[in-house]
Amino acid sequence: GDSVTQMEGPVTLSEEAFLTINCTYTATGYPSLFWYVQYPGEGLQLLLKATKADDKGSNKGFEATYRKETTSFHLEKGSVQVSDSAVYFCALTGTGGFKTIFGAGTRLFVKA
Amino acid sequence: NAGVTQTPKFRILKIGQSMTLQCTQDMNHNYMYWYRQDPGMGLKLIYYSVGAGITDKGEVPNGYNVSRSTTEDFPLRLELAAPSQTSVYFCASSYPIRTGGRGANVLTFGAGSRLTVL
């Protein structure tokens, strides 16, 4: 079945550092890919998405590119802020489907 | 708009008790879901619904039941609570979007319900 694997955390960075959180997936057909973010005490919210190969999703300075050849959707940000401290989830929805499969989540701590 | 509203936010149950987690959405979404979040395990799908009167099992349905009598409401029932059901529960709803000819399903989550079974 479909699955998502993302790097284990926690990831601890200093403010203004470069962020990469790796995500790879297994799926048949052409899934849609997502990054969701969960701030402390809140539910998940959509950060960005990509629906086809080579698409780049972006939001709030975060970016991720849908790489079908490597089945990856790595999350990047050039300069993190303390307010980016949260848990980040990579996710996919299979072709024609409506059920979303989530990775285990990566906790990010950003120090001032 | 309120979005997705879950109640209660916190609850402590004794083993064998029953309870219902309430979920309401005001976005007229057809699809609704219940997930549970365990530490370091991501989110696991318990049940989902594609519209009023239609529900189906997800990955981890045992010990739970759902109903969907209206588009807005999707309650989750726990019968005979067990310590293994200690978790944070999230309700979500979704709408399909089309971008560049491709479909995607974007979830809107509630704030979560933290349940402890002792």
Image (cartoon, rainbow, N blue to C red):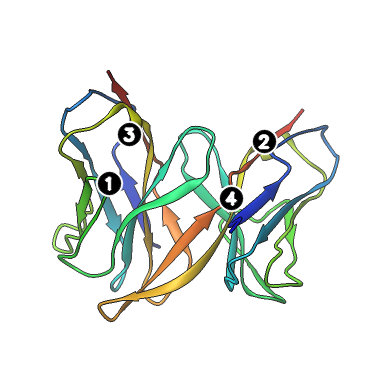
Q: Chain of mark 2?
A: B
Residue A110, image quadrant: top left
* Co-location on one chain, circles 4 and 1: no
The local secondary structure at tag 4 comes to: loop
Q: CA distance from mark 3 to mark 2?
A: 28 Å
- The residue labelled by disc 3 is A84
Q: Position of residue B101 (x, y in %)?
A: 28, 81
Query: Tag 4: residue type?
Result: Gly
Q: Secondary structure at mark 2?
A: loop
Residues tagged 4 and 2 counted as in contact (Cβ below 8 A): no
How packed mark 4 is, by other alpha carbons closer than 10 Å (few <14, some 14-19, many 20 or more), is many
Does the CB distance between marks 4 and 3 fall below 8 Å? no
Give me the C-alpha separation between circle 4 and circle 3.
Answer: 20 Å
The percent position of residue B74, horizontal first and vertical second, equals: 70, 62
Which residue is located at x 65 percent, y 56 percent? B61
Question: Residue farthest to the right?
Answer: B17
Q: Name the chain letter of the residue that bears numbered label 4.
A: B
Quadrant of the rendering where the C terminus of chain B is positioned: top right
Chain-order first, disc 4 or disc 2: 2
> Which residue, given by chain and number where applicable, does mark 1 sit on?
A60
Left or right, A94 with respect to A40, comes to left
Residue occupying the far bottom of the picture: B101
